Amino acid sequence: MPTLTIVANIKANADKIDLVKAELLKLIEVTRAEEGCINYDLHQDNDNPAHFMFYENWTSRELWQTHMGNTHLAEYMAATEGAVEEFVLNEMTQIA
């Protein structure tokens, strides 16, 4: 079974960049320790510091869905409520 690749684009409100960044950074260590997580890498756009992107690979969609239901993601959502302008998540499969 191919791995599941997740590309998550998060755009913070201009006045909330530092808050969103700090909360995103909190997710990394705990997520990387989760079953099924191959990599969980956070990026910040060089020209637009409000734009963050997670590039993730998971061994299965089921384990990624378990991740999505974990407490640390709920805590992130609560901490950044009203601070995120846009969130776009793509589930992808490598084809070549």
Image (spheres, helix red, strand yellow):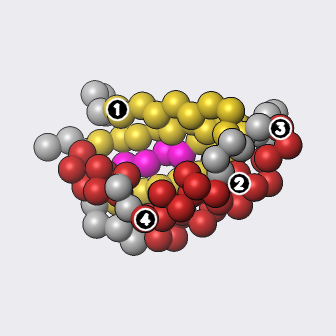
Which residue appears at 46% of the width and 34% of the height?
Answer: 89
Of pointers 1 and 4, the one earlier in the residue sequence: 4
Sequence-wise, which precedes: disc 4 or disc 3?
A: 3
The stretch of residues the image draws in magenta is 54-58
Q: Amino acid at mark 4?
A: Thr
Residue occupied by mark 4: 71
Give the numbered dot on residue 84: none
Circle 2/circle 1 CB separation < 8 Å: no
Number of the front mark, 2 or 1: 2
Q: Which sits earlier in the primary sequence, circle 2 or circle 4?
A: 2
User: Would residue 32 appear left or right of 69 to someone viewing this image?
Assistant: right
Gap in angstroms between the C-alphas marked 2 and 4: 18 Å
Q: Name the quadrant containing residue 25.
A: bottom right
Which tag is nearer the camera, tag 1 or tag 4? Answer: 4
2 vs 4, front mark: 4
| Real-space Cα separation, disc 2 to disc 1, in angstroms | 24 Å
Check disc 2 and report the residue beneath it: 21
Which amino acid does the dot numbered 1 rest on? Met
* Kind of residue sitting beneath label 3: Ala
Looking at the rendered image, the disc whose residue lies closer to the viewer, 4 or 3, is: 4
Separation of marks 4 and 3 at Cα, in angstroms: 27 Å
Crowd band around label 2 with a 10 angstrom C-alpha radius: few (<14), some (14–19), many (20+): some
Q: Answer yes or no: is residue 38 visible.
A: no
Residue bearing the label numbered 3: 14
Question: Element at badge 2?
Answer: helix
Which residue bears the numbered disc 1?
92
Please identify the quarter of the rendering in which residue 6 is found: top left
**C-alpha distance separating marks 2 and 3:** 12 Å
- The local secondary structure at tag 1 comes to strand
Compared across the picture, whether 80 is left or right of 71 comes to right
Label 1 environment density (alpha carbons within 10 Å; few <14, some 14–19, many ≥20): few
